[in-house]
Amino acid sequence: MTRKILIALAASLTLFAAGTASAQIGKAASDATDAAKHKIDEKRADSDAKKSGPVGKAVNNVKSGYHKNRSKNSAEKAKKALKDAG
């Protein structure tokens, strides 16, 4: 999670120095932020699953899986946007 936040921070700082690539860098920062938020939601769902009964555990495990996939997808989009900017 910290790596994704650092990518977002680096992308944000680079935004000031970038000319034509600023839109791609902004997109990368946005995607990295989304990835971090999904990772937080994934961990929250994992925690809730541990505290829940059988039905709540199943629901929270589905939520966790969803957020894990969204986080991975957003991180890949951020990497692609940074690669396209360079």
Image (tube, rainbow, N blue to C red):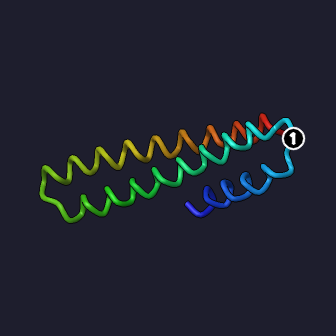
Quarter the N terminus occupies: bottom right
Q: Who's the residue at 46% across and 54% down the image?
A: 39
**Residue flagged by tag 1: what amino acid is it?**
Gly
> Where is residue 76 drawn, in percent x and y?
61, 40
> Where is residue 51 drawn, in percent x and y?
20, 65
Quarter residue 23 falls in: top right
In the rendered structure, the answer to whether residue 56 lies left or right of residue 21 reads left
Label 1 packing within 10 angstroms: few (<14), some (14-19), many (20+)? few
In the rendered structure, the answer to whether residue 26 lies left or right of residue 20 reads left
Secondary structure type for disc 1: loop
Q: Who's the residue at 80% across and 52% down the image?
A: 14
Quarter residue 27 falls in: top right
> Where is residue 30 drawn, in percent x and y?
61, 45
Q: Who's the residue at 66% across and 48% down the image?
A: 29
> Where is residue 75 drawn, in percent x and y?
59, 45
In the rendered structure, the answer to whether residue 59 lies left or right of residue 29 reads left
Residue topped by disc 1: 19
